[in-house]
């Protein structure tokens, strides 16, 4: 390696999806350390996540193996009323349209795969460089973004050529980069209770799998939406996990009572009885599944107004720390993975520590408008747009081809 092409030191703050994806991209050339305030089991809940082609195209490039995550291909969308009567069904061939599938899986399984990609021996992945170093139970509580220095929970400091802040929607470091008066997360007025139910639990509760579950096993797998259709804004979004041996149920309804725990965490415990009361008039099968689910997690849906800036000096915000959005289109994690892929600019030959601030600003200039547009698309979805408009937005969301292609438009 030439003298002017030496590895940079990189700090990643946060071991969520965006942070781990950034660590995987950058480990091919640079020395990466990830600092996480939680323990290694952080975010191990059994709830689902969907990744669309804009993220899966990138994941394929970095060695992602869907078999490790028990991923279920999404091949269409189905809307039913609260009693399960079919309203709308459409096939949607993501692979054919966008060159990659849309996949659903357990969030914990997907994060575990990203952790493997960030930390597995380089030989195992067929890449150069060294695995990212993971430091748990010692997150960053302060930052000097110009100098690339963070202060850790234990009071010690760590310094690097690049600091990537991926510490989530309630980022402690965001104001130090985006400004002390930068936007804060705002509640949408909706609450989401996320439940994962196994096939065994379903059979035990119902004596068999529900008809809508059986249809998923024998035909194309769909995202199923149960809609109240009575003006109450109650919906259930259901899709398969772990090779269809589990179902994710995201139950969304107007927030009844704001609670600090559900504002500050997406892993807060939910009230099963309250859920049964809210969805009392829905199909018996989904109510019984709520009753037997082992984990019920509640989350007040929030998003973040576009920030004035993402980067200062040697530091940059990515993921929910930069552009939190509600899950109404399932794009939040995908946009975070797009952010991570943009760090390919730091892998180019001849990049030195002196180039870092300019490159981070270039990443911001490309990524910030893209994230703001997807946020706007997501907010439109929350208002209940037409089918044609829904698919126009899908095209916009899914047709991102990476940082080098995006730079051609700048």
Image (cartoon, grey):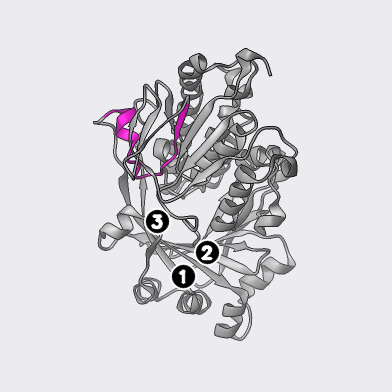
Q: Which of marks 2 and 3 is nearer the N terminus?
A: 2
Q: What residue is at 59 percent from the left and 26 percent from the top?
A: 403
Q: In this view, does 219 lie above or below 183?
A: below
Mark 2 Cα-neighbour bin, 10 Å: few <14, some 14–19, many ≥20: many
Q: Nearer the viewer, residue 254 or 353?
A: 353
Q: Name the residue under label 2.
A: 46
Q: What residue is at 46 percent from the left and 24 percent from the top?
A: 364
* Badge 3 element: loop
Classify residue 383 as left or right of residue 391. Answer: left
Q: Is residue 168 above or below residue 26?
A: below
Mark 3 Cα-neighbour bin, 10 Å: few <14, some 14–19, many ≥20: some
Q: Indicate yes or no whether the magenta region holds residue 178.
A: yes
Quadrant, the C terminus: top right
Residue 389 in view here: no
Q: Residue 299, located in which quarter of the rendered image?
A: bottom left
Q: Which of 389 and 10 is in front in this view?
A: 10
Q: Which segment did they paint magenta? A: 162-179
Q: What residue is at 51 percent from the left and 48 percent from the top?
A: 330
Q: Where is residue 141 in the image (x, y as percent from the top left)?
A: 32, 40
Classify residue 188 as left or right of residue 229. Answer: left
Disc sitting over residue 295 in the figure: 1
Q: Mark 3 points at which residue?
A: 266
* Badge 2 element: loop
Q: Where is residue 253 in the image (x, y as percent from the top left)?
A: 37, 61
Q: Position of residue 31 (x, y in %)?
A: 57, 32
Q: What residue is at 40 percent from the left and 20 percent from the top?
A: 313
- The span from disc 2 to disc 1 (Cα, nearest Å) is 7 Å
Quadrant, the N terminus: top right
Marks 2 and 1 close (CB-CB < 8 Å): yes
Residue 357 in view here: yes
């Amino acid at each position: 390696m030439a003298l002017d092409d030496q590895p940079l030191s990189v700090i990643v703050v946060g071991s969520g999806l965006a942070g781990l994806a950034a660590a995987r991209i950058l480990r091919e050339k640079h020395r990466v350390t990830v600092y996480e305030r939680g323990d290694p089991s952080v975010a191990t809940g059994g709830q689902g996540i969907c990744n669309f082609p804009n993220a899966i195209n990138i994941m394929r490039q970095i060695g992602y193996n869907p078999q490790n995550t028990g991923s279920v291909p999404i091949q269409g969308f189905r809307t039913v009323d609260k009693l399960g009567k079919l309203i709308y069904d459409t096939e949607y061939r993501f692979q054919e349209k966008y060159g990659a599938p849309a996949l659903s899986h357990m969030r914990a399984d997907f994060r575990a795969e990203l952790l493997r990609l960030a930390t597995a021996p380089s030989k195992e992945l067929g890449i150069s460089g060294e695995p990212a170093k993971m430091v748990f139970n010692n997150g960053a509580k302060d930052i000097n973004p110009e100098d690339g220095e963070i202060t850790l929970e234990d009071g010690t400091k760590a310094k690097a050529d690049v600091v990537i802040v991926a510490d989530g929607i309630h980022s402690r470091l965001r104001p130090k980069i985006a400004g002390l008066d930068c936007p804060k997360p705002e509640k949408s007025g909706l609450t989401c209770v996320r439940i994962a139910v196994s096939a065994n639990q379903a059979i035990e509760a119902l004596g068999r799998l529900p008809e809508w579950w059986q249809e998923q096993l024998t035909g194309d797998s769909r995202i199923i939406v149960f809609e109240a259709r009575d003006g109450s804004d109650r919906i259930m979004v259901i899709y398969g996990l772990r090779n269809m041996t589990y179902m994710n149920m995201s139950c969304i309804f107007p927030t009844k009572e704001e609670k600090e725990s559900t504002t500050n965490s997406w892993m807060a415990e939910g009230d099963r009885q309250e859920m049964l009361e809210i969805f009392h008039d829905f199909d018996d099968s989904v109510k019984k599944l709520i009753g037997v689910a082992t984990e019920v997690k509640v989350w007040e849906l929030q998003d973040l107004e576009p920030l004035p800036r993402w980067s200062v000096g040697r530091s940059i915000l990515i993921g929910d720390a930069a552009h939190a959005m509600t899950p109404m289109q399932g794009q939040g994690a995908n946009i975070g993975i797009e952010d991570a892929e943009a760090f390919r600019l730091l892998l180019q030959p001849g990049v030195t520590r002196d180039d870092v601030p300019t490159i981070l600003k270039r990443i911001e200039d490309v990524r910030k408008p893209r994230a703001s547009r997807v946020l706007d698309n997501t907010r439109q979805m929350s208002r209940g747009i037409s089918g044609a408009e829904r698919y126009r937005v899908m095209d916009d969301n899914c047709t991102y081809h990476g940082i080098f292609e995006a730079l051609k438009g700048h």
